Amino acid sequence: MTETSTFATGATTPYGAAPAKMNPLAEIVRNRLAELKAKGISQTDIARRAGKPDGQSLLSHVALGMRKFPAGDLEAWATALELGGAEREAFIRIATEATYLLVASEVMAEGEEAKGMRIWRELTALRAELFATRSQLLRGQAQLADANARVLSLEKKVELLLQRKKAGPKRGDTEG
């Protein structure tokens, strides 16, 4: 049986797990769950959106600071939690770091501190590359959105100009 501890929040977590109030990932998830609940969206609904029909337990445990999301599922959970922009980026960055730290800690706990530190350094380097690439992608998406908005604006102007030409000059208008 796993030893547990109870925190001021009333949450009981296995020893070694950070209580939610000290866990930024748990805080993001807990706040988002409250916002979505106010909109009538349940944890079961969120889990289904993430493609994890039985994921409400995982979601609850993450909100309590007892578990982490699997690294490969972060995008799906971010979408299911309706996270966007900077909030989505923070969620993915914090969840990724938590996963990396967990992996490195497990290796170090097995008595292989040098291997754990090497894994941590490799994961940190990969994380930096991942976020640089993600930032590049987001900048490209923002530029594309701006370009699309400009195209739509120009298309409207062209349409209006064509409508004016078809209608012909109004009385009192002079061309030239």
Image (cartoon, rainbow, N blue to C red):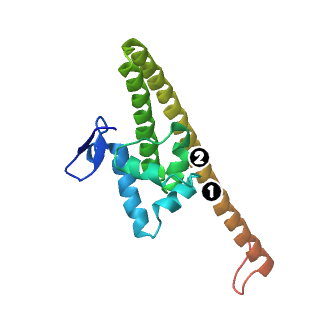
In the rendered image, the quadrant that contains the C terminus is bottom right
Q: Residue furthest top?
A: 114
Which residue carries the number 1 mark? 150
Residue drawn at 28 percent across, 36 percent down:
15
Image position, residue 157 (x, y; %):
67, 66
Which picture quadrant has residue 95? Answer: top left
Three-letter code for the amino acid on which mark 1 is drawn: Arg
Examine the rendering and report whether any part of residue 168 can be seen.
no
Q: Counting other residues with Cα less than 10 Å from the Cα at mark 1, is it few (<14), some (14-19), or many (20 or more)?
A: few
Numbered disc 2: secondary structure:
helix
Disc marking residue 141: 2
Q: Which of marks 1 and 2 is nearer the N terminus?
A: 2
Numbered disc 1: secondary structure:
helix
Horizontal arrangement in the rendering, residue 67 relative to residue 143 (left or right): left
Horizontal arrangement in the rendering, residue 69 relative to residue 49 (left or right): left
Which picture quadrant has residue 67? Answer: top left
Q: Is residue 171 above or below residue 8?
A: below
> Residues under labels 1 and 2: Cα distance?
14 Å
Image position, residue 76 (x, y; %):
55, 48
Horizontal arrangement in the rendering, residue 152 relative to residue 68 (left or right): right
Residue drawn at 27 percent across, 43 percent down:
22
